[in-house]
Image: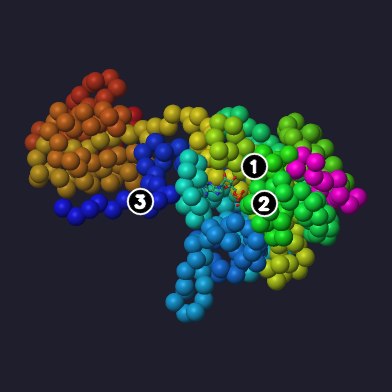
Amino acid sequence: MSERIKTPRGTFDVLGEAALARAELERTAKGIFERAGYSRIETPTFEATELFARGVGESTDVVQKEMYTFDDGGGGSLTLRPEGTAPVCRAYLEHGMHKLAQPVKLWYLGPYFRAERPQHGRYRQFGQVGVEAIGSDDPAVDAETIVLLAEILEAIKARDLRLRLSSLGTPDTRAGYKAELQGYLREHEGELSQEVRDRIDLNPLRAFDADHPGTRQVMAGAPLLLDRLNDEDREHFETVKALLDAAGLAYEVDPGLVRGLDYYTRTVFEFSSDALGAQSGVGGGGRYDGLIEQLGGPHTPGMGWAAGVERMLLASDPPPTAPPPLDLYVAYAKPEYREQAFRLAADARRAGHAAQLELGGRSVKGLFKQADRAKARYVAILGDEGTALKDMESGEQRTVEIDTVMHHIRR
Ligand code: HAM
């Protein structure tokens, strides 16, 4: 026998209860987005590599080592999308969405791809649900999007949640701060981990993320970007916080909050769950006021977030899900009744009933067992004496004309 082929590392099949739980999560999120006036957007699963190189940032782990990049066959380079913000901004520009009422409020759900080392809660193909609100720098946009994610997490009963919040200011503030932080890190180079030392030039902010004890000690005394914000950015951040307070949403200001993508300006935030272990980030995002410009468009502010579908489900106790109830289970006693039975099941479905045909060649005993398992309300068996129709709830059985089955089950 030849060897069986399995799912690639870091991927998984979704079936049975897991499929129902995912569908339920999607339904919950969709309802919350629609009530807030967000419309759905779907973008391709692959894009020009350049989009992520420019959008997400050359210095990020995502672009440096986690992208599935391949040749388009004509000299161009394509990449399986590692995230959704750059693609949505590309679409905003491509479809001239600046002509619509601003901000344009969009939501999405779909598969994303990162060549990471797989572990619990970390996959190479994972689901993200997210929103992007593009075209307004009103701090109420920041607060509203954060509250939407909180609402979804509450609806799915996610456990042990923490919301951390910070502001990164403008690129200018950040550049000045980056130089200051680099100076500070160089002063303490001997106490830092090798990894952090190697990144002083490229991405010194990542030092806040380190687990290395020496590095952590150095970072405890490091200058903070939050203390360097200009007046406008500070006021923006204060308003975001005041609005979250008004919404009754608890958060911690975490000046060391690091996001793995380069496009953020001003507000950044992350929900994590202590129920998840090492990969505790459930969802996060922030403002990206410079991204559209970086993609060749006019200056356009934007704000959004994405949450991992698998991590949301891992962090919640999904309600027991069951397949929808079945109105009618149709079987036949002899092969010559197959066509009629087939038609009855199809007609019943067309009339809006949940109906299934016996497809397994089961005995009478076997098919009743199967109908029971499927929680069928009625079983109809076509035979020489007419159609035996059994009400599975009352146990009552009678013989009826096939044309009247629908009439009976409707009652
Ligand atoms: P991100 O933090 O890179 O942000 O990803 C968002 C969420 O996706 C994470 O919190 C996590 O739950 C999930 N996730 C990321 N990588 C994996 C993985 N390998 N396996 C399982 N889940 C994963 C973004 O992607 C930004 N585009 C969010 C955003 C939208 N910012 C502004 N707008």
Residue neighbourhood size for the residue with mark 1, other residues' Cα within 10 Å, grouped as few (<14), some (14–19), many (≥20): some
Left-right relation of 252 to 260 = right
In the rendered structure, are the residues bearing label 3 and label 2 in contact, judged by CB atoms less than 8 Å apart? no
Numbered mark located on residue 7 in the image: 3
On whether residue 103 falls in the magenta region, the answer is no
Q: What kind of residue is marked 3?
A: Thr
Q: Position of residue 305 (x, y in %)?
A: 65, 48
Circle on res. 403: none
Q: Marks 3 and 2, how far apart in space?
A: 35 Å
| Local SS, label 3 | loop
Residues 15 and 393: in front is 15
Q: Residue at x 82, y 46 (%)?
A: 223
**In the image shown, does 221 or 177 lie closer to the viewer?**
221
Pick whichever, 39 or 92, lies toward us: 92
| Residue that mark 1 sits on | 212
Q: Residues within 10 Å of mark 2 (few under 14, many from 20)?
A: many
Q: Quadrant of the C terminus?
A: top left
Query: Range of the magenta residues?
Result: 218-233
Lower sequence index among marks 3 and 1: 3
